[in-house]
Image: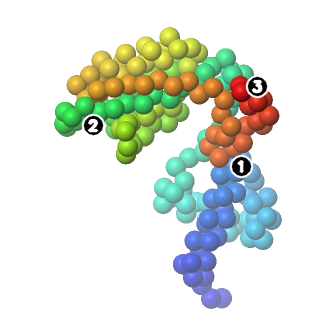
Amino acid sequence: MARKSVKQIKKDEDKILNALKKNARGSIEDIAKKYHFSRQKVWRIIKRLEEKKEIWGYYTVVDEEKLNRKRFIILIKRSTEPIDNGIQKIIDLTMHDKGSEIGVEVESSSYLHGIYDWYFVISAEDMKSVKRFTHLLIKEYQVWISEIQILEDIFPLKKCGIVNPSKSKLVDFF
């Protein structure tokens, strides 16, 4: 049997990735049926994508409101001070651990290009917890922070590629 081209392998991987983005809990069997692949082929593609770190993991999208939590975005602007010895704290996820200790869950954090240099997406019970978290950020990285902005995520229409099942409630906010 002829081996598939690199282009075709990439197309097959993209199909599997799209299926997993829409429903990471979808069964291998369902994905195989949808794309007319064998179950073994789907399993091999997923394993290969995980080994290549193209798939980092799987995530459950939750409704923070039903969990009595709110979602916030923290934007940070860096100072001009070199960050030499502070970078390892960032890599070690020091603030993610400290946030957990005070009831703040860090959903994501990223280095940015633009007006702001870093952002955190977090969930917490209230603004008080978020302010405690930002005070910890300032204490830990004071010399490297010139500005912090806190935004409350009022209504997520789409998270992690998943459309909010209560999307029609958005009209209540306008």
Q: Earlier in the sequence, mark 2 or mark 3?
A: 2
Q: Is residue 6 left or right of residue 138?
A: right
- Nearest the viewer among 38 and 122 is 122
**Amino acid under label 1?**
Asn
Q: Is residue 46 visible from the viewing direction of this image?
A: yes
**Amino acid under label 3?**
Asp
| Residue holding disc 2 | 87
Q: Quadrant of the N terminus?
A: bottom right
Residue at 66% from the left image edge and 58% from the top image edge: 18
How far is mark 2 from mark 3, CA to CA?
43 Å
Label 2 packing within 10 angstroms: few (<14), some (14-19), many (20+)? few
Q: Secondary structure at mark 3?
A: helix
**Amino acid under label 2?**
Ile
x, y percent for residue 93: 38, 33
Label 3 packing within 10 angstroms: few (<14), some (14-19), many (20+)? few
Residue at 25% from the left image edge and 31% from the top image edge: 79
Going by the picture, which residue comes out furthest to the bottom?
2
When the figure is inspected, residue 21 is found, relative to residue 11, above or below; the finding is above
| Residue holding disc 1 | 23
Q: Earlier in the sequence, mark 1 or mark 3?
A: 1
When the figure is inspected, residue 148 is found, relative to residue 107, above or below; the finding is above
| Residue holding disc 3 | 172
Q: Earlier in the sequence, mark 1 or mark 2?
A: 1
What kind of colouring is applied to the model shown?
rainbow
Viewer-nearest of labels 1 and 3? 3
Viewer-nearest of labels 2 and 3? 3
